[in-house]
Amino acid sequence: MTSRGAGVLPNVITDAATGRRINLLDWQASNRRMSWVLGLIMVALLGAIGYLLAQVTNPGSALFFVSVAGFIGAGQSVAAYWFSDQIALGAAGARKATKDEHRYLVNVTEAVALGAGVPTPNIYVIDSPAPNAFATGRDPQHASIAVTRGLIDMMDRQELEGVVAHEMAHVRNYDIRFLSMLAATIGAIVILRDLVLRWFQFGAFGGSRSRRSSGGGSGQGNNRGQGIMVVLLIALLVLGPILATILRLAVSRRREFLADATGAYITRNPEGLASALEKLGAYQGEGLEVSEGVRHMFIVNPLAHHNSMDLFATHPPIQQRIDRLRRM
């Protein structure tokens, strides 16, 4: 850590673009609280989907469908909380760093962790020439940072400190846990959507409609009610993942700005991270091949066009991030 990185990270920082003061302790508490709220919302939403599915197919099996939906939601929440870090590291092809092979990276990470006031995270390396990095973990005590070989080779010490501090800020601010729970919500809805599509494919709804239509005049009312249920079910299954994805990406873009600011305060050197982002934005070499599910976790999206203010962009424009840092 450079001399500018010494000291304790303040609990209140100022957004360089808006002038708004942000209390990091409040932000962390909000992320922890919203993570659990998201888990409850996911179970409730999936329960509603299960109930609508039962009304469309067999109202007498409502308890079964709601139980299955709740089980999927609970399973996704548990997996996101306990195993999202290992899933992300595996998907990125990361391997554990060692002091013998990666002493420079380990020393920088230990120094930044000291400045951030958090335990040193587990350190991983991705064998790719493309410069990038990401953090994962449910809290500062169970955190990991993964850095590509290309990033280590490209950055000087102050720039590497800036990148590591940015990733450590995500962990310190509990961004990772929040986004993992949000991603789990989307994943659970998609699982149910695929199950329902299979039901349609095998004609599960046809038998239900024919049974209800045999009821004469009352059957018409049942069909009308069933039609409403089908519309609601399709709306939840089709629009739910889309809206949730847009929300997740918008939240992800906002958290990148805050992680930049927090990382700059950790090192007391905004220029280090700004210079690192310039190099990342200018990189034109071999790309980093990772699954779509983990691209939002990196300091910049491996796909350059996903660093923008577009609705489906995972990261804000790199130049906008650099400008904010240089106004600090």
Image (tube, rainbow, N blue to C red):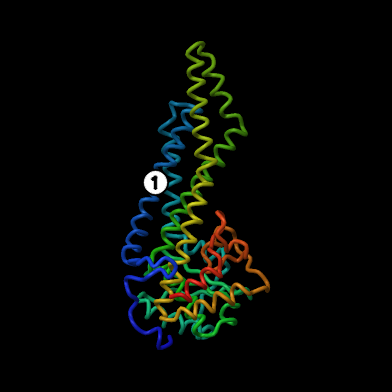
Left or right: where 121 falls relative to 282: left
- Image mark count: 1
**Residue sitting nearer the eye, 100 or 190:** 190
Residue lying at 53% horizontally and 63% vertically, measured from the top left = 316
Q: Is residue 56 above or below residue 9?
A: above
**Residue sitting nearer the eye, 82 or 217:** 217
- Residue 161: image location, x then y, percent: 47, 80
Q: In this view, does 109 lie above or below 41?
A: below
- Residue 248: image location, x then y, percent: 48, 54
**View extreme (bottom): residue:** 3
Residue 43 found in image quarter: top left
Crowding at mark 1 (Cα within 10 Å: few <14, some 14-19, many 20+): some
- Residue 304: image location, x then y, percent: 62, 65
Residue lying at 37% horizontally and 84% vertically, measured from the top left = 6
The residue under label 1 is: 41
Q: Quadrant of the N terminus?
A: bottom left
**Residue sitting nearer the eye, 7 or 311:** 311
Amino acid type, label 1: Ile
Q: Quadrant of the C terminus?
A: bottom left
Tag 1 secondary structure: helix
**View extreme (top): residue:** 216
Residue lying at 64% horizontally and 74% vertically, measured from the top left = 283
Left or right: where 47 falls relative to 207: left
- Residue 198: image location, x then y, percent: 59, 37
Left or right: where 230 falls relative to 16: right
Residue lying at 56% horizontally and 28% vertically, measured from the top left = 205
